[in-house]
């Protein structure tokens, strides 16, 4: 499924109010908040609430979880204005659908992954997010994968992630035609701290792709 106009942008791994507002001011469509404690971009529920409370309207706030306890996910979505859940682990379709929220299912693009099968496994997902496979790391690897292995006729929207930055996002969009692109490390000064100049440039490159 190709989206030829207005490729959406999600800035993931937001860890503070300033970076959230920089992303929104630059034109981001969504921000990602990481609720995975092993990640350097993990944030607490109280900080996440501060961030979502500061966000302008019409920005999608995405909560990222990795094989999290159901109780913890319920606590987050009760206390934080999460619009969409992003599941980055081995969650089943039944688990993903438990929380009465639109969800995205991340797929790590290791050898042998069949995206047609993944679409069939998660019929209620709003989109599949495709990320690079690195053993032992569920996401945020900063690595790209071979975009040539992505079929162009999938029935669900694709969010392209993995190693994207200001130097390659335009090429990625022209080749894959994704619904959206997702970036974290590619627009950072250091892990967890965004660079507003890189964010602006990344979104500019996306708009002009």
Image (cartoon, rainbow, N blue to C red):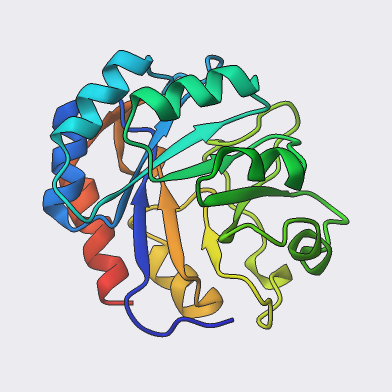
**Residue 174 location in percent, x, y?**
46, 79
User: In the image, is 19 to the left or to the right of 83?
Assistant: left
Going 57% across and 44% down the picture, which residue do you hit?
A: 143
User: In the image, is 77 to the left or to the right of 22?
Assistant: right
Q: Image quadrant of residue 190?
A: top left
Going 17% across and 40% down the picture, which residue do you hit?
A: 55
User: In the image, is 86 to the left or to the right of 205?
Assistant: right
Going 20% across and 23% down the picture, which residue do you hit?
A: 50
Residue farthest to the right?
Answer: 112
**Residue 123 location in percent, x, y?**
72, 62
| Quadrant in which the C terminus is drawn | bottom left
**Residue 113 location in percent, x, y?**
83, 56
Relative depth, front residue between 172 and 123: 123
Going 25% across and 55% down the picture, which residue do you hit?
A: 28
**Residue 61 location in percent, x, y?**
34, 43
Residue 73 drawn above or below residue 54: above
Task: Tell me, yes or no, if residue 36 can be seen here.
Answer: no
Relative depth, front residue between 161 and 50: 50
| Quadrant in which the N terminus is drawn | bottom right
């Amino acid at each position: 499924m190709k989206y030829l106009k207005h490729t959406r942008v999600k800035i993931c791994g937001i860890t503070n109010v300033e970076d959230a507002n920089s992303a929104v001011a630059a034109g981001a469509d969504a921000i990602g908040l990481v609720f995975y404690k092993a990640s350097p971009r993990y944030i607490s529920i109280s900080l996440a609430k501060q961030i979502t409370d500061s966000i302008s309207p019409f920005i999608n706030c995405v909560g990222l979880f990795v094989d999290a306890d159901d109780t913890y996910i319920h606590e987050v979505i009760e206390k934080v204005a999460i619009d969409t859940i992003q599941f980055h682990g081995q969650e089943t379709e039944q688990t993903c659908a438990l929380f009465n929220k639109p969800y995205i299912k991340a797929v790590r693009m290791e050898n042998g992954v069949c995206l047609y099968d993944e679409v069939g496994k998660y019929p209620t997902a709003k989109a599949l997010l495709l990320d690079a496979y690195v053993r032992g790391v569920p996401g945020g690897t900063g690595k790209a994968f071979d975009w040539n292995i992505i079929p162009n006729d999938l029935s669900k929207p694709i969010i392209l992630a993995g190693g994207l930055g200001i130097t390659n996002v335009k090429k990625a969009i022209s080749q894959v035609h994704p619904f959206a692109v997702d970036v974290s490390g590619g627009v950072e000064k250091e892990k967890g701290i965004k660079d507003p100049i890189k964010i602006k440039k990344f979104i500019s490159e996306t708009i002009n792709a």
